[in-house]
Amino acid sequence: MRIEDPKIVAALPELSVELRRASSLAELTSLAIGGTTDLLRIRDHESIPGLLSLLDYHGVPHRFLGGGSNLLVGDGELPWIVLQLASPDPDVVLEGNFAQVDAAADLGRMVTYCAKHDLGGMEGLIGVPGTVGGALRMNAGAYGMQIGSYVREVKVYRAATRRIEILRGEQISFEYRHTSFAPDDMMLAVKLELPSKPYKEILQGIRKDMLALISNVRERVRSAFSVELEHEVVIWNA
Ligand SMILES: Cc1cc2nc3c(=O)[nH]c(=O)nc-3n(C[C@H](O)[C@H](O)[C@H](O)COP(=O)(O)OP(=O)(O)OC[C@H]3O[C@@H](n4cnc5c(N)ncnc54)[C@H](O)[C@@H]3O)c2cc1C
């Protein structure tokens, strides 16, 4: 879909929104499949209510893209435009045991950054691709932990009220790969509270989890198919 209306195009710079014409969703998603459409990159959270009112007023359908790691997009010219948050610099700010994180931040990089500052708890998510916003949307988790357990506040654009609101952690229900956010709510930022843990200990935990996963996969393939997997990963035990 192309944004043709000159009124919309003219309003975008004032809203700090960048228009990227004919963006290929194949280039923006992990599965590398998908057609083309116009993409709007949002640089200022505060412009979102105005932008969405403008799009709705002119009848422009839209979808929200995070890191594109959990999306299978149809081919050809897509019948909607795509909105995406641009990541500010810095996208993670630490204060004691709290991390204030932009929804556009890369999840793995955020977890690593916190770990290097001796903040743990979320290390199971280090290998999960995507953005922090995408992880919040579906309560991403791995190795027995989930992001929702560490959420203290979420800054969200609520489609129902057309306003940006701050929700406290206890106002949100985080279930297995599911949250109570409405389908058209947009997560903008999150405040996480993370337990203190030395970086060295965090690394040891990740290593233990990885080795257990590899051995579990090998065992399951062996018992289900009587096949001995080759060692794809070279393990150097210290
Ligand atoms: C190899 C691989 C391994 C994975 N392993 C795991 C795993 O171990 N655990 C796990 O939980 N998941 C896993 N996933 C799934 C995926 O990484 C998560 O779902 C991730 O959180 C999606 O984030 P994203 O930013 O890429 O979202 P996208 O794929 O861009 O979007 C997914 C959905 O979230 C919505 N969304 C994205 N950002 C926002 C936002 N800011 N506000 C509102 N809605 C938003 C989109 O509209 C869309 O509906 C894996 C995926 C891959 C490819």
Image (cartoon, rainbow, N blue to C red):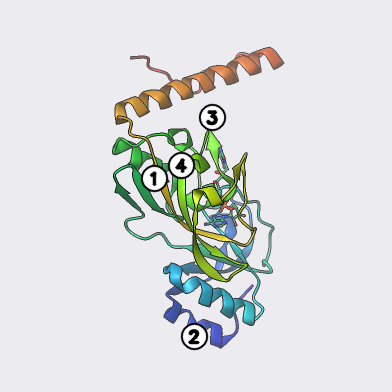
Tell which of 173 and 25 is nearer to you.
173
Q: Looking at the image, do the residues carrying marks 4 and 3 touch, with CB atoms under 8 Å apart?
A: no
Which badge, 4 or 2, comes first in the chain's sequence? 2
Label 3 beta carbon less than 8 Å to ligand 1: no
The x, y position of residue 184, in whole percent, is: 62, 62
Residue beneath disc 1:
110
Amino acid type shown at disc 2: Ala
Q: Quadrant of the N terminus?
A: bottom right
The x, y position of residue 190, in whole percent, is: 44, 53
Amino acid type shown at disc 3: Gly
Q: Is residue 74 above or below residue 40?
A: above
Q: Is residue 90 above or below residue 163?
A: above
Which badge, 4 or 1, comes first in the chain's sequence? 1
State how far apart marks 4 and 3 are (Cα): 13 Å
Label 4 beta carbon less than 8 Å to ligand 1: no
Q: What residue do we see at 50% from left, 64% from top?
A: 165
Q: What residue do we see at 54% from left, 17% from top?
A: 215
Asked if residue 131 can be seen in this view, the reply is: no
